[in-house]
Structures are given as C-alpha cells and as structure tokens.
Amino acid sequence: MKWKGLLCAACLLAGVSGIQAAPESDYQHQALTKDMLPVFYPALKQQMTYPMSWLSGHFRNFDQWRHEARKQLRQALLTPDSHVDFQPEVLDTIDRGSYVGYQLAFNLTDESRVSALMLVPKTKGRHAAAILLHDHGAKFDIGKEKMIKPWGDEQKLASAQAWSDKFFTGRFVGDEMAKLGYVVIAVDALGWGDRGPMAYEKQQALASNFFNLGRSLAGNMAYEDMRAFDFLASRPEVDPERVAIVGFSMGSYRAWQLAALRPQAAATVADSWMGTYEGLMTPGNNVLRGQSAYYMMHPGLPQLMDFPDIAGIAAPKPMLVFNGGQDKLFPHAAVEQAYQKLHQIWRSQHAENHLVTKVWPKLGHVFYKAQQLEAFDWLKQWVHPELVQQQVSSEH
C-alpha cells in the first residue's frame, strides 16, 4: 500500500507538470554510431557554416580576409613562435653525380633538434628549391627517406625503396628534382624515422598528451613545417624567392596548409589529399577513425573554415592539386566539391590560370611517374624559369 501511494503521487505530479509517459520506442537508446560519431552528428554538421570562408560572403576585401584567415589558422596551431637559431651541422655527405646529398642536423624549434636530408646541385649560384613533405601511410620507420633516397643504412634503404616502388613508380621525388636543378630538403614529422618510435595504435595517446600539455599534435606538425620552410629559404644555396612546396598524401595536406601559412612560398604541388568536411565526414572514412586523423585536426578550426578554404588562403599563388579517381580514401564527390571551392577562390582573384586541379581516373592513392612529370613540368614555369628557357632552346 505504501508503494502504491507513492506511485499515485508520482502520477499526480507528472500530470500537474504536463509530463506524460512516452512509449519506450520513442527513447533514444543508442547514443553513438559504429563510427563513434554522436547520433546527432548530422545536426552538428549543419552548424558548420564556415563563417571565415572567403566564399561565405562576409568579406569584401580579399587581402583583409586572407590576413585574418591566416591569423585564425596560425592561432589554431596552439604553438608559440620559436626563436632559437637553426645552427645546422653536416653529419654526412654523398656524391650523386650532378648533385650532392647532405645529412644535416639543425634546430627545428626551440624544443627539437632534428636530422634532415638535403640535396644540392653542383651548379653555382642560388637555386630554385622545394621542401618535400612525406606521407603517413602507417609506416613509421621512414619519413624523410620516403622522399629522398637514403644512404648509410641498408635497412632504411630497403624500406624506402619498397615504399617508392609502391607509391612513386620506384622513383624518389627529391632525387628526381635535384637532377632538374632544385635544392630539396625533407625532415621527419614527429613519430617517423629518426623521431620515433611510433605505432599506429599509439597515435591517439600522443595526440591526447599534446592536448594535456596545452598544445596540439596537428599544430606541432604544421609549425615544424613552417620552420623547415624557413630553414630551407635561409640556405645560401637557395633563392628565397623561388621556394616551392611538394607533398604526397598526408604530405599533400601539409603542403597546401603550409602554403596558407607561408605566403613566401612560390608554388605548391599537393597530391592525394583534398576534400571537404561534408564529403569526408561520412561513415567508414579514415578521418573518423581517430589515430592518424589527429595529425590533421586543429581544435575549433572546422567551425570556421573548410579544407579548401584553408588552402585558398594561399591564393592567388600557383597551386597544383592532384587526386586519384580510384582513391578510396577520398570519395570523388568530396574531391570535386573541394575543387569547385578552390576554383571559386582563385577565380575571384582573376588568377584561375594559377590553379590546376586534376583527377587521374585510373589511379589510386599514388604519385606515379606520369603525375610527377606533369607536376614538375607545371612547377618549372613558376620557380625554375631557366628550365623553360633550356627547353625552348633545345626545341629550336
């Protein structure tokens, strides 16, 4: 009788307050999807209106927008400026015919002194140059060695050659560019090569520890790329007005991000990483898995700008963006949506001839020889005009 009285009282209160019992089927028992998205994620995606996008219509002056957007991007890195001198040191050299390979050590930031691989043509004077940004690939034993052929370590050489065979038609992008007369440099991102050891399942812990330290893993990588660019541009062998950015896969993301952060870059080649948040944040996509995604995740930034909006901060500087039509990581619709946004931005500055976007229908997540040759041919008009002159002379 006592419990019955309590239940009646509860019913009376519910009736007075207007609360009515709902059928059990109306309650939301499942709070997360199998991709670890909250079930209300579609509502959150609708709130991603990108108010800092040049395409939002909120801005009239492109220069002012670009200044403010770059400032917002820089702040999102959660990384203060470094002031330590680079203090480079040559650790080893190798003669490769028309160019020389250097293994260097230098102060990348106030906290990190790193090793790097640099190739320098033997010709005199200041050269066009390129910073080479390596991929992720869940392969951590090599980083810079994915872009420049290593020496002095047979195990790393074998690993790098196998990677090159799989993704680059057996070629090393850095060595191919050095043969063309470029100074090139490659540095390990944190977790790769000499800056490991990293394991796939440990990335999330590393990212959370950066957050615990008031920093960001993605921001750390982005800022280190900025410093590596500055180091290359400071070299006596390099013409600072002709420094390009070249990246593959995660390195492609790093490439157009660096172009946005460093307006001094002369031109950018980005292969196999471009899409929109709308198109990539879909069930089953890599960006929803955590782990590797943390290298490209700046807290709060998606509320301000889409991926192509960030790349668009580099406009109207020359940029080439490739994607593979068979690349399962980047759905065709997401790529095309991003390309449309990019062209809108460059077109608004009457510089659409400075932007090249291309989907290679039969290729996947690769940077094969044909793509490299097309990219190098495009790049030389912006940073290596003497190659254009040599070609014209040879044709006549």
Image: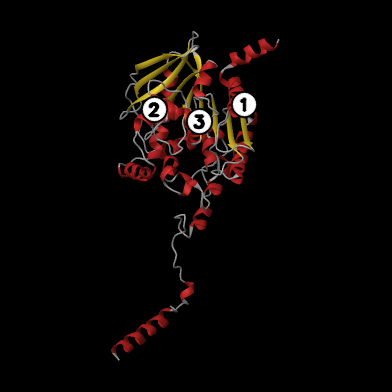
Q: Position of residue 150 (x, y in %)?
A: 42, 23
Amino acid on which disc 3 is placed: Gly
Q: Residues within 10 Å of mark 1 (few under 14, many from 20)?
A: few
- Marks 1/2 in contact by CB < 8 Å: the verdict is no
Which of pointers 3 and 2 indicates the residue nearer the eye?
2
Gap between marks 3 and 2 measured at Cα: 24 Å
Mark closest to the chain's N terminus, 3 or 2 = 2
Task: Tell me which numbered mark, 3 or 1, is placed earlier along the sequence.
Answer: 3
- Residue 388 location, quadrant: top right
**Is residue 251 something one can see in this rendering?**
yes
Contact check, label 3 and label 2, Cβ < 8 Å: no
Residue 307 picture location, percent across and down:
52, 41
Position above or below: 239 against 47: above
Instruction: Determine which residue is flagged by label 2.
Output: 155
Q: Which residue is mark 3?
A: 247
**SS of the residue under disc 2:** helix
